[in-house]
Image (cartoon, rainbow, N blue to C red):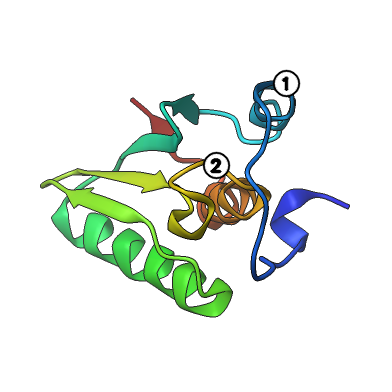
Amino acid sequence: MKLEHRDCVRHANALDPRTIDTLLNDVPGWTAVDGVLSREFRLPDYRATIAFVNAVAQVAETQDHHPEMTVGHASCSVAWSTHSAGGALTENDFICAAKVNALYPGMTSA
């Protein structure tokens, strides 16, 4: 089952580096560095950026897994990690990243 069709689970375990490398193939545009899965999205204008932020917020609320976001005029950086796993990456981070990628398939990344 594709990651974007799965839901986050409570008490997810930290992933090992090999699994992280494998899961990165399922979330194009994202990078994993020091326990953080991140991607910058470029958008046409501020209105589109805010619409995107709100869509990401809806994913976060539905999954009960919340990212750090940095909002610019025509960009938004999204960063996932799992505090309950000691700030490590879990499958929940990748599930949410896949759901965010599915929001706007035509979007470009920085």
Q: Who is closer to the viewer here, 51 or 71?
A: 71
Q: Is residue 16 above or below residue 74?
A: above
Q: Name, please, the residue furthest toward the right.
A: 1
Q: Does residue 29 sit above or below 94 in this rendering? A: above
Q: Position of residue 4 (x, y in %)?
A: 70, 55
How many numbered discs sit on the rendered protein? 2
Q: Is residue 23 left or right of residue 75?
A: right
11 to the left or right of 50: right
Name the residue: 23% across, 63% down: 50
Locate residue 6: give its quadrant. Answer: bottom right
The one nearer the camera, 22 or 13, is 13
For the residue pair 65 and 54, the one nearer the viewer reads as: 65
Rendered-image quadrant of the C terminus: top left
What label sits on residue 102 in the rendered view?
Answer: none
Within 10 angstroms of label 2, few (less than 14), some, or many (20 or more) residues?
many
- Indicate the secondary structure of the residue bearing disc 2: loop
25 or 32, which lies in front?
32
Q: Which mark is residue 18?
A: 1
Percent x, y for residue 29? 50, 28
Direction bottom: furthest residue:
62
| Residue at 49% across, 31% down | 30
Q: Secondary structure at mark 1?
A: helix
Based on the displayed image, in which of its 4 quarters is residue 57 positioned?
Answer: bottom left
